[in-house]
Image (cartoon, rainbow, N blue to C red):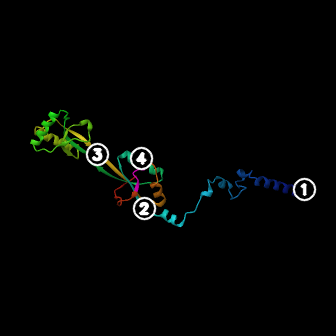
Amino acid sequence: MRIVVVVLLAVNALFFIWSRGWLDAVTGLPAQGGREPQRVAAQQHPERIQPLAASAAVAAAQRSCLELGPLEGDAALAAAQAALKTAGAEAQVRSSEQAGVWVVATIKLADPEFRARKEATYTGLHLKFEPLEGLPAEQPAFVLSKHASQAEAAAQAENFDKRGLKGLRVLALKAPLTRHTLVINQADGLLAAKLKASKDAALAAGFKACSAAPAASAANS
């Protein structure tokens, strides 16, 4: 009889210890079972959680094609891609090359009398010319021709030289530029709203509906 009493006391003592959670690490059986009160304690403002209305759920599930751009230059592209990555979005890149503008221009014509003589010469040769604009440091001067590449401008300057027109130079009026457009083919409603509301300067160009289906050769970001 004494043995039975001792066993019962030992069992009760073990149960008491286990029920307090003191043996959780040893037994692997948590006293709290599946309740896991620590999860409830870890919630952040659970009262703010609201179920989506049916209309909002439908809007969130809708997919649309969005595009951002044009972005001028590789630096702008890299900044926009980094901003999209932070927002958890990926986009395709469509790029196009914008030709530069090179001109064959005179030397600086600061002397009014010398400038007048040049005007008379070009007029007598039936050459079209116009004042140089966009390069303040190189003005005043005349532009005799415009070209899409430096090589074309250099070739024309050589032709002018053969005709006896001296004092000409090739200037880059506008450097060639690569323009990029970022395309998200299947943006859900939540992502679309998030991107359109973004205040990130790299996305300042703003997202809009895709103007056309992305080309098959578009490069993935």
**56 is higher (above) or lower (below) than 91:** below
The residue labelled by disc 4 is 79
C-alpha separation, residue under disc 4 versus residue under disc 2? 23 Å
Tell me the residue at 58%/61% (across/down): 50
Q: Earlier in the sequence, mark 2 or mark 3?
A: 2
Tell me the residue at 74%/51% (across/down): 23
The residue labelled by disc 2 is 64
Q: Amino acid at mark 2?
A: Ser
**196 is higher (above) or lower (below) than 118:** below
Q: Amino acid at mark 3?
A: Pro
The residue labelled by disc 1 is 2
Q: Nearer the viewer, mark 4 or mark 1?
A: 4
Q: Are marks 4 and 1 in contact (CB under 8 Å)?
A: no
The x and y percentages for residue 137 are 26, 36
The residue segment tinted magenta is: 201-207
| Mark 1 secondary-structure assignment | helix
